[in-house]
Amino acid sequence: MDRRNFIKKTAMATGAVAATTLAAPAVVSAKTQWIAVSAFGKAGLLGQALGEFAKFVGTASGGRLTIKVYHAGELVKPLEAMDAVLSGTAQMGYGAPYYWAGKSDAISFVAAMPYGLTAQEQNAWLYYGGGIAEADKIYNGLGLKFLPMGNTGNQMGGWYRKEVKSVADLKGLKFRMPGLGGEILKTFGVNVVLLPGKEVLPALTTGAIDGTEWIGPAADLGKGLFRVCNNYYYPGWHEPATILDGFFDKKAWDALPPDLREIVERAAAATNLFILSKFQAINNTAMQKLVREHHVKVRRYSDELINAIGAKAAEVLPELAAKSPEGKAIYKHITDFRRTMLDWSGYSERAFMEVRDKASL
């Protein structure tokens, strides 16, 4: 099934284009055109997904809402996407919430929390646990509307030029890691750097950084990180699953009639599912290629490192949340939901993974 059909069928299955259920007076013939700016390049999965999202919205709305997409660097720089929306240059932006940490002390919690929720748990939180409404409190405060528009699933821990075996090996490292994970690494003496995707490989090549996390095998293979670094670590404690954000100028959003808002909401939900499903489908093949063809060394973080980072996370995350009322609120919201998930996930996902390994299929 191609991407376009996937999004169309998923959205229709969830009621995205239920035009027949809308009262006739809600359908407006006026046409609206939006500009969307992205933090991601055109060629990768995330760029493709945004393009398909825009095509679907245009088709489903009968041309009443069209979205012109500008990928990273085409209209504004990758990390300036939110500024473009806030200034009125664009009506929609696309990225990852932690890219906008300079705008809000709380917004990085929307993306992913170290030792937090899996992708499936995050979707449960977003759609049935009040997560979208909670995140919207942060985005609304900036004059924006938030919608989840993708999830990377569990990420890899990152690429390192040299092995990291102990806490002592972290000190002085120049490492690219955005979000809350980067804040935790800073406490171990890591020089944390925030770079947009297109600058990561050049920085590794020149030695400006000693390592980087990116996403997972498929995205990392495509970016060519194996050409510079050979040590590929797991698990991705920092981003157990990362939400990608669609954010919209609040005034432009509120000006849409209800049926168009629902088309956008359902198309965003379909894009969320598409991205997560595609990453899940292609990561294993990419991992095999990294190991067998490019001779990458896949290494597990030592217990010393994982235990030390986990203990530090329990200290640092509440401190970061305490910087603002919004941070306190969303941290509590996520940790309360996480607490409810631990029991059921233990009986279901974790227990099944353990027994599945014993089956001779």
Image: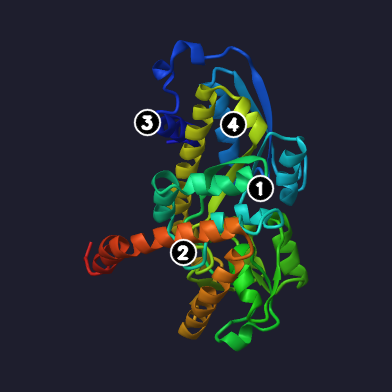
Q: Is residue 297 at least partly visible in the picture?
A: no
Marks 2 and 1, the one that precedes in the sequence:
1
Question: Residue 40's mark?
Answer: 1
Callout 2 secondary element:
loop
Marks 1 and 4, the one that precedes in the sequence:
1
Residue 311 horizontal/vertical position (percent) = 50, 79
* The C terminus - image quarter: bottom left
Marks 3 and 1, the one that precedes in the sequence:
3
User: Label 4 near label 1: C-beta < 8 Å?
Assistant: no
* The N terminus - image quarter: top left
Label 2 neighbour load within 10 Å: few <14, some 14-19, many 20+: many
Question: Residue 54's mark?
Answer: 4
The front one of 34 and 287 is: 34
**Would you place residue 266 above or below residue 231 in this image?**
above
Callout 1 secondary element:
loop
* Residue type indicated by callout 2: Gly
Question: Residue 13's mark?
Answer: 3
How far apart marks 3 and 4 lie (CA) works out to 18 Å
Q: Mark 2 points at which residue?
A: 116
Residue 213 horizontal/vertical position (percent) = 60, 66
* Residue type indicated by callout 4: Ala
How far apart marks 1 and 4 lie (CA) works out to 15 Å
Residue 259 horizontal/vertical position (percent) = 50, 22
How far apart marks 2 and 1 lie (CA) works out to 25 Å
Which one is closest to the eye, mark 4 or mark 2? 2
Callout 3 secondary element:
helix
In-image side of 21 versus 239 (left or right): left
